[in-house]
Image: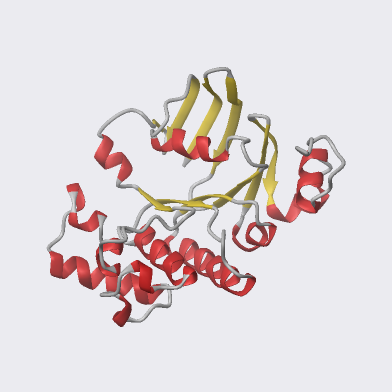
């Protein structure tokens, strides 16, 4: 579904992606891991077209990501943002239905509200949450609202940016379980970036280790602990010593 081939991206003298190559099969969950500043978020933004690569190619469902109708292309994606990124001035249901009330997906407000409440229920929130403002919700509830928004338009591809950041271990487990259930239920293709190894084990079919702008190792999550790759081994075990230099 998604293929990056020898993708390079620099910001001035800062070379972020140095030939990233990765394939994400349709209907699978790929988790990209790696240290801060290794280019994980940049890679997602390149796929979405928010950042233009300097060189290399990106294909989505066999077609160049930067070709064709932009609105139709973006309509295939859902996104759960790291900080929730909810609109604080809009009630919860309007946050969830934001895309459904605009552009090519536009629905009548009443229908959009019904869909929003249905998606809120899917992530374990009751209908009475719909008319609250985001500030009235806990961090875990806000994350669920963000997840409901990500799936509201029934996307084919869902991106998850650090989905458990800022959550306690129990709520992180709830979010991980929801993500896994929803991706399987929808048959969606998922790409997640995270530092949380518990999330990796819970939601990944395959993982990719990104370091210094290239994929050092990729394969099934079941092979992660016995990969033989020194970069992956150091990262998943949190060792200070190894090929990845710790910034002191």
Picture coordinates of residue 175, whole percent (x, y): 53, 68
State the residue at coordinates (48%, 61%): 183
State the residue at coordinates (69%, 45%): 219
Colouring chosen for the image of the structure: secondary structure
Looking at this view, is 136 or 78 the one in front? 136
Looking at this view, is 224 or 146 the one in front? 146
- Left or right, 88 with reference to 20: left
State the residue at coordinates (84%, 48%): 239
Return the residue found at the far left. 108
- Left or right, 13 with reference to 109: right
Looking at this view, is 134 or 243 the one in front? 134
Q: Look at the image and tell me in which quarter the C terminus lies.
A: top right
Picture coordinates of residue 241, whole percent (x, y): 87, 41
Compared to residue 81, the image places residue 42 above or below, namely above
Q: How many marks?
A: 0
Picture coordinates of residue 36, whole percent (x, y): 64, 41
Return the residue found at the far right. 241
Picture coordinates of residue 125, whole percent (x, y): 39, 78
- Left or right, 107 with reference to 133: left
Compared to residue 217, the image places residue 67 above or below, namely above
């Amino acid at each position: 579904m998604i293929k990056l081939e020898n993708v390079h991206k620099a910001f001035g003298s800062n070379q972020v992606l140095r030939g990233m190559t990765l394939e994400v099969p349709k209907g699978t969950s790929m988790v990209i891991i790696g240290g801060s500043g290794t280019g994980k978020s940049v890679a997602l933004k390149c796929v979405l077209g928010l950042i233009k690569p300097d060189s290399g190619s990106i294909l989505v469902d066999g077609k160049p990501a930067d070709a064709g109708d932009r609105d139709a292309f973006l309509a295939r994606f859902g996104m759960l943002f790291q900080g929730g990124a909810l609109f604080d001035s809009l009630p919860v249901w309007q946050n969830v239905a934001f895309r459904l009330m605009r552009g090519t997906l536009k629905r009548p407000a009443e229908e959009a509200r019904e869909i929003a409440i249905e998606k809120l229920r899917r992530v374990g929130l009751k209908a009475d949450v719909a008319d609250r403002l985001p500030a009235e919700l806990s961090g875990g509830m806000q994350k669920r609202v963000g997840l409901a928004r990500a799936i509201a338009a029934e996307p084919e591809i869902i991106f998850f940016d650090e989905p458990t950041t800022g959550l306690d271990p129990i709520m992180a487990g709830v979010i991980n379980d929801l993500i896994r259930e929803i991706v399987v239920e929808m048959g969606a293709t998922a790409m997640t970036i995270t530092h949380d190894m518990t999330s990796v084990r819970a939601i990944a079919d395959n993982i990719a280790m990104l370091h210094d702008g290239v994929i050092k190792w990729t394969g099934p999550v079941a092979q992660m602990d016995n990969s033989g790759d020194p970069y992956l081994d150091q990262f998943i075990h949190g060792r200070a010593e190894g090929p990845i230099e710790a910034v002191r």
